[in-house]
Image (spheres, rainbow, N blue to C red):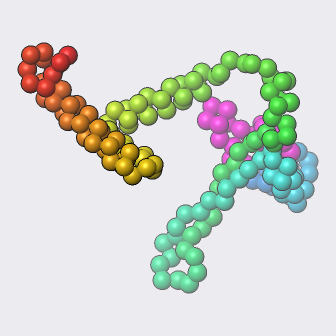
Amino acid sequence: MLEALYDLVDYRTGRLEPAIVTIATIAERIGRSYSAVHDALGRLRNFGFLKWIRRSRPTENKGEAGPQVEQIRNAYILTVPAELQDHVRRLLGDNPTPDCERWRREDARNELADMISKISVSQAHRDLWHGDKLLGETFAQLAAGLDQLEAQERESGRAGETGGSF
């Protein structure tokens, strides 16, 4: 069953959607009954090799009783149980990170840096400070001063003009 699921993974996108190929189709493909495949999926989930999320979407049945949603394809992920992760790591060794993962990480870093560059020091302080009140007020004053300096530097980037010292 696990091997059949590995065959269904779209390695380009990382998606595993056996709902595209129904349980009945998987059963036929591996020569097992529908209930055997269904039970095997449950066991894989219980042992930590598979996770899934039931998904639904709203229907347009306004005014009818009960929840107004219909089930759509489940979202699946193949996982390695915690007990086997060290063993798998030893088997696989230190392989290079795939290009797609390096690009994803680089995009995430760039997105975070862009987001951070757009937030003011005062805003970051308000959102992140949860410590001592007196110290927080001191940091808030420092943050406001830094924001004021940054605003002055943005007004004029040429040396010798007010605010700028580039």
Residue 9 x, y percent position in the rendering: 71, 38
The total of numbered circles placed on residues is: 0
4 in magenta = yes
* Nearer the observer, 83 or 74: 83
Closer to the camera in the image, 150 or 36: 150
**Quadrant position of residue 142:** top left
For the point 41% across and 30% down, the residue is 113
x, y percent for residue 73: 65, 56
Q: In the drawing, does residue 35 fall left or right of residue 161?
A: right
**Farthest residue, direction left:** 161
Residue 40 vs residue 147: left or right? Answer: right
Magenta region includes residue 23: no
The image quadrant where one finds the C terminus is top left
The residue at 20%/36% (across/down) is 148
The quadrant where residue 81 appears: top right
Horizontally, residue 53 falls left or right of residue 153, namely right
Could you say which quadrant of the image residue 93 lies in? top right
Q: Considering the image in quadrants, where does the N terminus appear?
A: top right
Whether residue 156 can be seen here: yes
Magenta range is 1-20
User: From what the image shows, is residue 87 above or below residue 60?
Assistant: above
Could one spot residue 147 in this view of the protein? Answer: no
Which residue is pictured at 84% across the width and 24% down the height? Answer: 90
Q: Is residue 79 above or below residue 91?
A: below
Q: Position of residue 38 (x, y in %)?
A: 84, 57
